[in-house]
């Protein structure tokens, strides 16, 4: 009771959830590592400001301010996932290995998998991703092709025993991911789904407000043949994206490495038996810089037998080297495809492959040059084909034949996005900065000379309409910790990174003047809307 009566009663109209006096914030503000903003210090700053609290290596509590920001990111993602027919569910974290044994990942995933035993000594695992589980659900519940397409998604905690957990939420061992799984009857529909999800992902990241790059990616352990990554470009990132400033093509170095040489790009053409899905033959296709391989021209050079279909995908470095070294199948090169003859293409096939690097000419447009940038992977989308459907025998009867259901999966690391956004937006001064859409509170009111006028200002702000919306509604914090000095509270407003701080100081008492402090990410100028806010009380 004593502590409650210390909180100002004039603020009864301001919700307790918006009052810093009710919030669990650390009072110790010093940091061992200094105040410049590198990866270590973004983690430090988030810790010092009370957003996160480390429990053990790579495992954190999201404190109330971080949870507010996470909720905002999740709302944006929910909105966009549901706009493309996403159905939200929640699958269990604690899984049995049965389905993982069927897909082979129980044997191949290695040390990243967190495993345990129940009281009967049966093995279990903590889900690092849910392809197996969702396949089992759909296999049990879906009976007819009419029930597809299906797009199921969840936002849950994932567990990966990372070799090097680092930088707070950037690489956690327990982290929050949005993962969507798509199910289509035909390959064309699955490719369409991939396109729809790529557009939805672009809308998500546009709304989150941190500049991002979309790069061709290696499929890694998840598999499949078409995948793209979403990256926040930042020097602290662990990935390298090679990008062409001329045509905008970008690829993760892992992928760019294999598909490019100085002279051309390599693709794998695979003939697949449509009924069984098994691979019949494979050839390397090399096209000169600036050209896309044409499925039509490949079919002319390499006619398909009835019941076979052609799949075309960029080759990675191992595939390219294996195909070039083995020379098992005659190579279908540019000349055979009727593309302009280029001796350098044949030369490159003969063994001139090298790791693509900054300074190489772009294989997509031939006029640009590749530059390398460090980046943080925040999202990853895959077209999986029949992977998981084949190993778990998920089939659909359509037009008289039984097919494996066509798959895709689509992930965003929500907790990683939170810290990566802070990382990209904060500069070298002693405080956080947030993109407006995900800041835990858009504004803070800091009353330095009594709280009697705060409710008025609070209400006035709640009525401000920007773009047809009351953007400040439930989005304003009040620093009513009157037991702290003005200097301490002003410093906190900076550290916590409220985009807009309204200081009610002496000038307010004397002439109703509010001091407005802006704290925006460097990529944002003063929002037009903020200039129009009038605050006369
Ligand atoms: P990374 O290359 O950084 O290890 P990944 O390729 O293994 O990531 P995916 O399996 O593609 O990750 O998972 C989808 C998304 O989940 C990633 O794009 C990333 O945003 C997020 N993510 C993956 N691992 C972690 C982690 N350890 N901590 C936080 N987020 C993660
Ligand atoms: Mg990983
Ligand atoms: Mg990766
Ligand atoms: Mg990935």
Image (cartoon, rainbow, N blue to C red):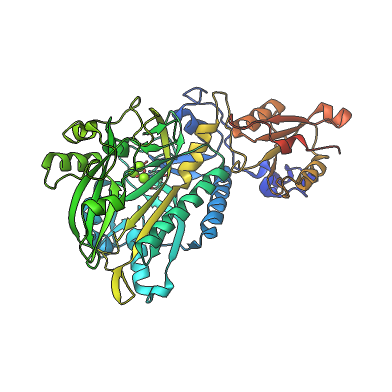
Q: Residue at x 44, y 50 (%)?
A: 177
> Nearest the camera: 406 or 534?
406
| 332 sits to left or right of 362 | left
Q: Evaluate whether residue 466 shows in this view.
A: yes
Number of numbered discs visible in the structure rendering: 0
Residue furthest to the right in view is 511
* Rendered location of residue 38, percent (x, y): 46, 26
Quarter of the image for residue 206 reads top right
Q: Evaluate whether residue 9 shows in this view.
A: no
> Nearest the camera: 144 or 456?
144
| 320 sits to left or right of 93 | left
Location of the C terminus by quadrant is top right
Quarter of the image for residue 369 reads top left
Image: 371 above or below 143: above
Image: 128 above or below 402: above
Quarter of the image for residue 143 reads bottom left
* Rendered location of residue 157, percent (x, y): 43, 52
Q: Which residue is drawn at 58% across and 31% down?
A: 523
> Nearest the camera: 381 or 92?
381
Ligand 4 placement by image quarter: top left
> Nearest the camera: 420 or 62?
420
| 248 sits to left or right of 292 | right
* Rendered location of residue 362, percent (x, y): 36, 32
Q: Which residue is drawn at 37% across and 63% down?
A: 134
């Amino acid at each position: 009771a004593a502590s409650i009566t210390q909180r100002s009663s004039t603020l009864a109209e301001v919700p307790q959830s918006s009052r810093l006096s009710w919030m669990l914030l650390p009072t110790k503000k010093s940091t061992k590592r200094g105040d410049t903003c590198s990866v270590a210090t973004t983690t430090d700053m988030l810790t010092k400001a009370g957003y996160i609290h480390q429990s053990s290596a790579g495992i954190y509590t999201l404190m109330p301010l971080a949870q507010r920001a996470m909720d905002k990111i999740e709302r944006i993602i929910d909105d966009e996932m549901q706009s493309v027919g996403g159905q939200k569910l929640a699958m269990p974290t604690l899984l049995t290995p049965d389905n993982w044994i069927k897909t082979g990942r129980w044997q191949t995933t290695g040390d990243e998998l967190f495993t345990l035993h129940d009281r009967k000594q049966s093995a279990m695992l903590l889900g690092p991703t849910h392809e197996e589980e969702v396949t089992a659900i759909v296999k049990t519940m879906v009976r007819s092709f009419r029930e597809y397409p299906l797009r199921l998604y969840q936002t849950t905690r994932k567990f990966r025993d990372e070799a090097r957990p680092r930088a707070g939420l950037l690489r956690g061992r327990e982290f929050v991911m949005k993962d969507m799984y798509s199910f289509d009857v035909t390959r064309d529909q699955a490719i369409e789904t991939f396109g729809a999800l790529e557009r939805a992902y672009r809308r998500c990241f546009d709304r989150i407000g941190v500049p991002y790059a979309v790069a061709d990616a290696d499929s890694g352990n998840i598999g499949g043949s078409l995948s793209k990554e979403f990256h926040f470009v930042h020097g602290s990132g662990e990935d390298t994206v090679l990008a062409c400033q001329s045509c905008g093509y970008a690829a993760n170095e892992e992928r760019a490495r294999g598909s490019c040489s100085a002279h051309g790009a390599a693709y794998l053409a695979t003939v697949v038996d449509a009924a069984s899905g098994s691979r019949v033959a494979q050839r390397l296709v090399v096209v000169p810089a600036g050209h896309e391989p044409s499925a039509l021209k490949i079919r002319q050079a390499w006619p398909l037998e009835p019941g076979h279909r052609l799949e075309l995908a960029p080759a990675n470095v191992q595939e390219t080297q294996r195909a070039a070294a083995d020379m098992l199948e005659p190579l279908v090169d540019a000349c055979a495809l009727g593309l302009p003859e280029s001796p350098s293409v044949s030369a490159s096939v003969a063994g001139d492959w090298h790791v693509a690097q900054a300074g190489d000419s772009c294989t997509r447009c031939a006029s640009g040059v590749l530059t390398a940038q460090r980046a943080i992977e925040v999202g990853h989308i895959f077209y999986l084909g029949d992977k998981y459907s084949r190993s778990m025998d998920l089939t659909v009867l359509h037009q008289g034949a039984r097919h494996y259901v066509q798959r895709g999966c689509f992930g965003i690391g929500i907790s990683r996005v939170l810290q990566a956004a802070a990382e990209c937006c904060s500069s070298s001064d002693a405080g956080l900065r947030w993109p407006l859409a995900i800041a835990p509170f858009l504004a803070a009111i800091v009353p330095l000379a009594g709280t009697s006028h705060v409710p008025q200002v609070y209400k006035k702000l709640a009525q401000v309409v920007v773009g047809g919306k009351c953007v400040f509604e439930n989005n304003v914090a009040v620093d009513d910790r009157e037991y702290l000095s003005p200097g301490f509270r002003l410093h906190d407003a900076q550290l916590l990174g409220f985009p807009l701080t309204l200081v009610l100081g002496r000038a307010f008492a004397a002439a109703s003047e509010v001091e407005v402090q802006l704290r925006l990410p460097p990529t944002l100028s003063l929002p037009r809307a903020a200039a129009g806010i009038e605050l006369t009380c």
